[in-house]
Amino acid sequence: MNESEHARRGARAGRFWILRSTIHEEGRDPGHELRLRVQRVSAREGTIAVVSSATCIYCQISLGADTRVAHIIPSALGGKLASRNICCWDCNSAISAIEKSLCDALRGVTAMAGVQTGRGRKAPPLRMTDPQHGLTEVWGGHPTIMGTPPAVRPPEGGQVRFHFSATDLDSAALQTAHLLRRFGKTPDDLEAGKVVTFTGAERITFLDRFEFDGSISLPEHLRVFAKAALELLALHRPLLALRPELRDAAAFVRFGGPEVDVGWDATTEGPLGVVRPLWHSCEVWSAGANLIGKVVLFGAYPFTVSLTTKWQGEPVTAVHAVDPVAGRVLLNAASSEDGPLPRGWPNRVADLDALQLRLNELARALDARMHDVTVKRCSKDLMERWRREIGGREPCPQDFVRLQTLVDEECERLRSRRTETAPLSTPDLFRLVRQHFERLEREHGPAPA
C-alpha cells in the first residue's frame, strides 16, 4: 500500500495523532512522515499540519489550494494552531468579523499580558491617559510614558518657562528650538537666561491596578467559543466534524442560528483540568450522547459549549493549550476515548464566586508581570549611575546593598507618582538648540511674528 492510500484510509479511520508540524501514523516508526495530502506551514507561524478532509465544515464545498488559514483560537489573542483544511474562504472571512469583536473586547488584557500574535508579531499596545503623566502606552507590563504636549508656563521673574518631556538631550534641544521659534525667541534669549527650559525625562511608571471587565457575552462572542471547539474537532477528526449531528452547531457559528447552548462555566472541568492564568485552552470531548466543548481564554474566561446531545459518532477527545505570552503551543493531542460527563450536564452550575476567583488570579498575574518588568527597567537605568559611583573598581557587598537601595527608592518614587522635572541649562544644550534652530530657519524660513 502506498503512502497516499495509507493517508486516505488513516484519515477515514481517524487514526492520526498530531505533534507540532509532523503527522505520524499509529503503529509505524515515529520518524516516518506522511508527506502526501499534508499542508505544511512554516514553523515561524506556529501552525500545525493536518490531513485534509478537503471539505468546508460549514458549507460543505470543496476546499482549494488558495484556502485561507483558519486559527482555532484567534491569532490576535495569540492563537498559534491553524490549518487551511477546515473552512472555505467565504466562511472564514465571515467568522473573522465576529472574532475581531471578541479580540477588541479583550484588547486591554492582550496588551497588558504582552501577547505574541499567531504570526509572531506583537499585539497592538494599549494607549491610556494616566492622571499624573498624561498619555501612557502599555504593552507586556511595560507602561511607557509617551509624554505630554510642550507647555509654556506664565513668566516668572521675567523668564519664559518651557515645560515638556524628553528622553535625551537632542530631543530636548529640538523641542526647545521649535518652542523658541513658536514664541518669537532666539537661542541668544536661552543663553541669556530669558528663557528657561524644564524637562521631565521620565519614561516608566507603576500604573494603578489595571481594571478590566468581562463583557464578552455578546452573541457574536459566544459564536467564537463554539467555533473554536468545532474547529479543534475538525483539525483532529475532520470526518467527525462533518457529521449531521453537528449541522446546527456549524450553522450557529456561521450564521448565528439556530441557537447552541454556550455560556460562562467556571465549574465544569474537561480533560485538561484548570488552566493557569494567561494561558488559553480549547477542549472537545464526547461523553455518551453528548459532545462538549470548553474554551478558556487567559485562564480566566471559561466557556462551555453543548455542541450536540445526540452524538452518534465514535468516542473522541481533543485538547489544545497555548501560552500566548511566550508564543508557543503547549499541548495539542487527540484520542479515541470519551471524556468526563459533567454532573447535571447540559445544566451548568452558576458559581459566580469561582468565576470571580479566576478573574482575580488573572489580575494578580498581570500586576506581578508589570511589577517585575518595571523593577527590571529601573534596575537597568540605575545600573549606570551605580557603576559611576563605584568608579570601575570591583564591587563589594556594600555596593550591591547600595544598588538595591537605589532601585527601591526609585520604585517607591514611581509608586507614589512623584514627577520630577529639572531645568536644562548646559553648554551642550545651548549648542544643540542653536544647531536645530538654524536648521529650522534654513528649511522653513523665519518664524511668523
Image: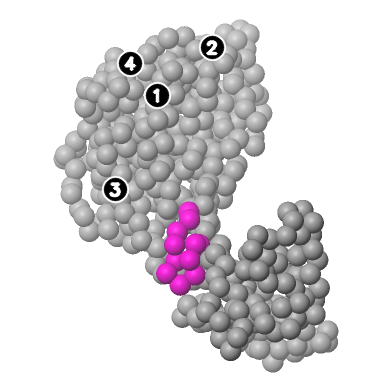
Instruction: Identify residue type, mark 1.
Output: Ala
The quarter in which the N terminus is drawn is top right
Q: Quadrant of residue 32?
A: top right
Mark 2 vs mark 3, foreground winner is 3
Residue drawn at (19%, 36%), measured in percent from left and top? 346
| In-front residue for pair 46/413 | 413
Give yes or no for residue 134 being in the magenta stretch.
yes
Element class at badge 4: loop
Give yes or no for residue 321 being in the magenta stretch.
no
> In the visual, does 204 lie left or right of 389?
left
Q: Which residue is mark 3?
A: 215
Q: Which residue is mark 2?
A: 64
Element class at badge 1: helix
Q: Which residue is mark 4?
A: 243
Instruction: Identify residue type, mark 4.
Output: Arg
Mark 1 vs mark 2, foreground winner is 1
Decide which of tag 2 and tag 3 comes sooner along the chain: 2
